[in-house]
Image (cartoon, rainbow, N blue to C red):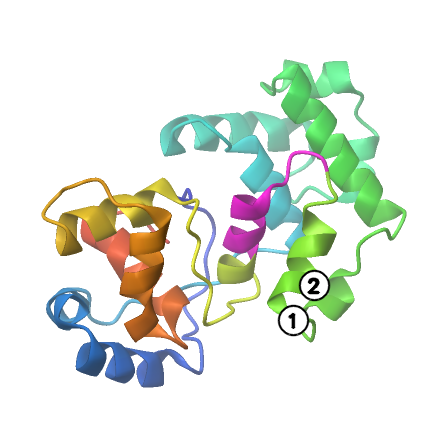
Amino acid sequence: MPSSTEISVEKPDYWDDAVAHLVKRDRILKKIIPQHPEVWLTSRGTPFITLARAIVGQQISTKAADAVWNKFTAVVGKRPSPASVLKTDVQGLRAAGLSQRKAEYVQDLATHFSERRVHPEKWASMPDEDVVDELVAIRGIGRWTAEMFLIFNLQRPDVLPLDDLGLLKAISLHYFSGEPVSRFEAREVSLAWQPWRTVATWYLWRSLDPTVQY
């Protein structure tokens, strides 16, 4: 599951329609959704900060990711930019708590932004898969990270992150009595959620840990 970060409270304009659809179409979500009133998906920072934080937080706990992020921003600035990251060499980033590989990834991310190899100003109007294609060309960003970006930064309504262990765990728990679930089975369950798979995923994450700010 993704880690927590700075949030706004504005509700996506599609949220109420999505909730109505999911409560009607899915017996599990009909029980889960009312347990989380007055909360919804929240947007996170600028595209660059969202992606940098995703790289920093890969394969470590939320608590550890927050600690490393705080050390990282102490070096490159509270609101990191491509320019501020590129002013710091790999050794400086490692001193801020990043591994060698993550330091290289963050610099590659900064280079892509500074050299305009990616087009964040166009992402809002681009299809999901076109955004994913741009993002996965950056070192350290795979499909899972790209899909988290679609969900949390662009707030796309119909993303199904099948590589997300939290989502698979929740589907296993709620739909398969705790038995292991395959990607195929997860996709089959999600058919009833379309075109609001992002919203269903978000509520299933919250069913595992309602205290985490998604």
Q: Which residues are magenta?
A: 139-149
Q: Amino acid at mark 1?
A: Pro
Q: Main secondary structure of the magenta part?
A: helix
Pick the front one: 136 or 41: 136
Mark 1 secondary-structure assignment: loop
Q: Nearer the viewer, residue 70 or 156?
A: 156
Structural crowding at the residue carrying mark 2, measured as other residues with C-alpha within 10 Å and reported as few (<14), some (14–19) or many (≥20):
few
Query: Under tag 2, what secondary structure?
Result: helix
Residue at 69% across / 24% down in the picture?
103
Residue 88, image x, y percentages: 79, 25
Residue 10 in view = yes
Q: Is residue 210 visible?
A: no
Position of 137 relative to 72 (above/below): below
The answer to if 99 sits in the magenta stretch is no
Q: Which residue is at a point 50% across and 33% down the rendered structure image?
A: 57
* Residue that numbered label 2 is attached to: 130
Residue at numbered disc 1: 127
Quadrant housing residue 111: top right
Position of residue 160 measured from the top left corner of the image (x, y, whole percent): 43, 60
**Residues under numbered marks 2 and 1 in contact, where contact means CB atoms less than 8 Å apart:** yes
Q: State which quadrant residue 180 falls in.
A: top left
In the image, taking residue 184 as reference, residue 43 lies left or right, namely: right
Residue at position x 29%, y 54% in the image: 185
Is the residue marked by circle 1 packed among few (<14), some (14-19), or many (20+) residues within 10 Å?
few
